[in-house]
Image (tube, rainbow, N blue to C red):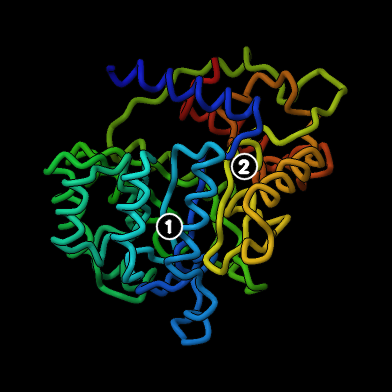
Amino acid sequence: MDNSSYKDFENQLRALAKEKGAPFYGSFELTGRCNFDCKMCYVHVADSNENRARELSTKEIISIIDSACNHGMLYATLTGGECLLRSDFSEIYSYLINKGVKVTVKTNAFLISQKHIDLFLKLPPREISVTLYGSNNDVYSKVTGIPAYKIVTDNILKIHSLGIPLKVSLTPCRYNVNDIPNIVFFLVQNDIKYAISPFLIPPREGISRDDYFLNADEQLEMLIKVREKIHKPFYNVDLEALPDVGGNKNESIIGIDCSAGSYRFCVTWDGYMVPCLSFDAPRIDLRRVPFLDAWRQILDHNMKVRQPIECNGCAYKAVCIRCPVCRYDGLYSGHCNTEICKFTLNKVKSGLCNFK
């Protein structure tokens, strides 16, 4: 089966899972601890005995995996914090693969060892997703607290050279925004797939990190500089012919329009099921509630979410930010975040994307 056929098959599975309300995709936050100290991180917790004790045990994680697989899970992501900090990472990863689950590993790549490489060659992942924070040690130190650039990029290049599926994610913030074009240039030069996360996930634990976030204008300026850096042509835009933002329907659709809580669930490092790591309501304690009951609560809660009226029939929906946490003006209001509307329209006007 070629890549396009497999993608079509995956999409059919997703659609069927959404229709049936099956927990098709699970994300497992193995730990909140991390070897980096990123200023804008949404989950990073102290590496203390107290926090280690709050983490799910290997046995608990395996039990959740078994329940999820029994009810339809075919895809999973292992993330953190830094998931490779867990001494049982290889055991959990291997268990998932041997259950027939397609596994993505999200990591900062600093701790990847030959042991991990051998594991990924023996039991190939669906993808290794590495977050790259800078194009040199100076930027890396500002963002992560560690001059880790060479170790991380050496591991990225090694994974890529061995043919292990790889994608690099970029998370722009005030500490690295001017360096994002340089990072993208490095990736393009090495023919490495990448994605830029448009907006940061709001932090948990009530900690305010707003000064690290970029506003919509800063994001747009960064994306323009990226395109210029890699000499990628801009789309020609007939500004006079552009339609207005917003749809023409006056009905709000019930239920979220992404994977979260419709066929995807997340398990936090401290043992709660949530619809998505970007929004964690409801939080259901999997140490107290059986997996299927928790999933049903997630599905029921999903029906309280109202899609924005303004998005129905909007000409720009296909190129708009998919994440409801960003695009909605609150998940239950039935209206959109007008700043995202402006951001999307300005992307089109700038020739960054073609909405047709």
Residue 337 seen:
no
Q: Nearer the viewer, residue 213 or 82?
A: 82
Q: Residues within 10 Å of mark 1 (few under 14, many from 20)?
A: many
Residue 266, relative to residue 60: is it above or below?
above
Which residue shows up at 58% across the image and 47% down it?
Answer: 265
Give whichever of discs 1 and 2 has the lower sequence position. 1
Residue furthest bottom as drawn: 49
Percent coordinates x, y for residue 67 in the rendering: 54, 49
The residue depicted at 31 percent of the width and 67 percent of the height is 140
Q: Position of residue 258 (x, y in %)?
A: 62, 35
Give the camera-side residue of 154 and 221: 154
Viewport quadrant of the N terminus: top left
Q: CA distance from mark 1 to mark 2?
A: 16 Å
Q: Can you say whether 191 is above or below 44 in the image? A: above
What amino acid is at disc 1? Answer: Thr
Determine which residue is flagged by label 1.
79
Label 2: state its secondary structure: loop
Disc 2: which residue: 260
